Amino acid sequence: MNKTISSKRIHDFQNKVFDWWSLNRREFPWRETTNPYYIMVSEVMLQQTQASRVKKKYIDFIKKYPTLEDLAEAKKTDLVATWSGLGYNRRAFWLQEAAKQIIEMKSFPRTVQELQELKGIGKYSARSILIFAFNTNLATVDTNIRRILISESFASEETSEKELFEIAEKLVPEGNARDWANALMDYGAVELTANKTGIKPTSKQSKFAGSDRQYRGKILKILLQRKKITLNKIQEELKLSEERITKILQKMIKDGLVFTKNNHFFIEE
């Protein structure tokens, strides 16, 4: 695909998106701050979770853990209880580990490379944190932004991730990366939706009901209530085969969510 984009086309596209956004922008609590720690919390929460579900959890989380130090020192049982309901609970522990790493660094990372060294922070999240916290002149590409680039004929469904990022970089208004990223996300989520455009995401989230993810959440709730519990008791509660529960627990132990000792399973304090 020809990557050359005229300055007029870029300018016209920027105006089109900003004009739409001036009438249709969405409000979220993480858009009311430039605190890099709060932005990091929101970005980790928003990984694989809808913004509507994140809203209240984000507010509750930063109230309970208002600083990096508060999060770094949090008990894991409290952390899981605060996170409960967002799914992918290991993200809470990754976030805590990232907080500890930043404290050791003495200052908040200011480059994509430094941020990607943090636990649970990938290319997309690293760029998003820099954009929203520091207005760094970068682009990032999520499912919504990819769909926009394809729908507006800047890319095709076959365009590689590397090329998508290169194209997106060319469209960023100098000095206004934060508003631009927010505008694009809203434009893709509200206006150029998957249903309207027929553009499919590169990956599809697996069904939640009856999945291991669902049972992982149920096991954590049981452990928060009981503190310690045997495999047999978990099996009685969940009505699953011993083989499947053992497999799920082994993965949770590997992820650092659950610990085992003397034939009991528990969440580390």
Image: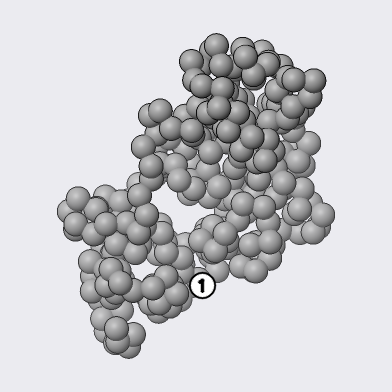
Q: Which of 208 and 238 is in front in this view?
A: 238
Counting labels gives 1
Viewer can see residue 35: no
Q: Which residue is drawn at 63% across and 62% down?
A: 116
Q: Position of residue 220 (x, y in %)?
A: 60, 25
* Position of the N terminus by quadrant: bottom left
- Figure check: 171 above or below 232: below
Q: Position of residue 98 (x, y in %)?
A: 70, 50
Residue ID for mark 1: 137
- Figure check: 138 above or below 187: below
Q: Nearer the viewer, residue 40 or 241?
A: 241
Q: Name the element at disc 1.
A: loop
- Figure check: 113 above or below 226: below
Q: Residue at x 45, y 45 (%)?
A: 48
Disc 1: CA contacts within 10 A as few (<14), some (14-19) or many (>=20):
some
Q: Residue at x 43, y 32 (%)?
A: 211
148 relative to 228 in the view: left or right = left
Q: Position of residue 70 (x, y in %)?
A: 74, 37
Tell me the quarter of the picture where residue 130 sits. Answer: bottom right
